[in-house]
Image (cartoon, rainbow, N blue to C red):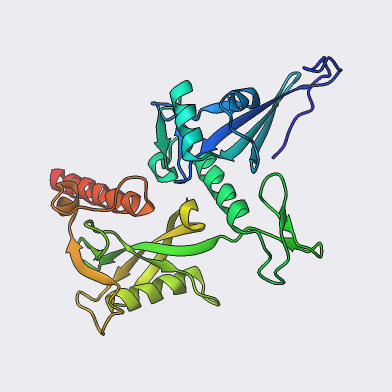
Amino acid sequence: MTTHEPDARLNDTGEEGPVVHENHLCVTLRDTALMSGDLTAVYLTTAQLTDFGVPTDGRVLLEVGATRGTIDRDYALRVDDAAAEAVMSGTEATHEVAPRDLDHRTWFRTVARAVAVLRTTERLRFDPRDGSELTWNETGSRAVNGAGGEYFPRVDPAVIGLIELSGTGRILLARNARNDFFSLVAGYVEPGESLEQAFAREVAEETGRTCRDIRYAGSQPWPVSDSVMIGFTAVTDDADARWGTDGELAEIIWATPADILDGAVSVAPPGSIAHRLIIGWARARATAATTDTEH
């Protein structure tokens, strides 16, 4: 994060220097941010938090911005249920919003990072290498252990992808036993694998199929599990499984664009990269089919 040095002026203490504003985005115990009805972040000053009886212990610096004579320091702050209720009853904050609810919206990056850094600094208190206590820096981007060694936050990469059955205009959708909707094959990257190798392995394990032409299709941070989802598209020649699966999936189907766009098949909810890939594919194929018909 970069800042610009403001011109010197009298600050709140009467001394010459920039005025510093401390602003806090409150994050609940459910990893949701307190936001207004139009999904705009609501920042509270230190004075407001004091009035609500909310301490600023454990806050993490998200961003520093500067205008002429003023520095804004924006923090993420964990609040318990009582504090969240007090804030929502006394400010314009009316909604608890999870990062996935903001996918591609203005405040997505801010809320996702707030959740991620708070989870990291709260949960990772000891260095797994030697057991010594970790001391995190102000932004939660780096820590030092008891011997002064550096430790960086862990982000677990996971792959997810859309698989099209060659020459058919259908994609493979899968449902696990926990959900009532269909999504895409996904899983964590194992040590020693490339991202493409990890995706091919997950497809083989979960569906009993091979895939080819694996291409990058986008990514999405997933802070509630300390992960980043890396999306792919791929093609398979296997309409049916070639071998037994690992049993993780309760149901596998082949779906057309019409199945998806007409709602005959319930798919992953908005805010997920799975939804984006599925709906994007269906709309693109439907548009292409319409264009072909017109010509």
| Residue at the farthest right position | 16
In the picture, the quarter occupied by the N terminus is top right
| Residue at the farthest bottom position | 243
Is residue 172 positioned above or below 114 on the image?
A: below
- Is residue 40 visible in this depiction of the protein? no
In this rendering, would 254 be left or right of 153? left
For the residue pair 40 and 84, the one nearer the viewer reads as 84
At which x and y percent is residue 124? 62, 59
Q: Quadrant of residue 144?
A: bottom right
Q: Give the total of numbered labels.
A: 0
Is residue 225 positioned above or below 243 on the image?
A: above
- Is residue 272 visible in this depiction of the protein? yes
In this rendering, would 218 be left or right of 156? left
In this rendering, would 208 be left or right of 70? left
At which x and y percent is residue 69? 76, 19
Residue at coordinates 45% horizontally, 31% vertically from top-left? 85
At which x and y percent is residue 236? 29, 72
For the residue pair 141 and 26, the one nearer the viewer reads as 26
At which x and y percent is residue 162? 32, 61
Residue at coordinates 47% horizontally, 57% vertically from top-left? 225
Is residue 76 positioned above or below 45 on the image?
A: below
In the picture, the quarter occupied by the C terminus is top left
Residue at coordinates 38% horizontally, 41% vertically from top-left? 101
Is residue 192 positioned above or below 171 on the image?
A: below
Residue at coordinates 41% horizontally, 70% vertically from top-left? 199
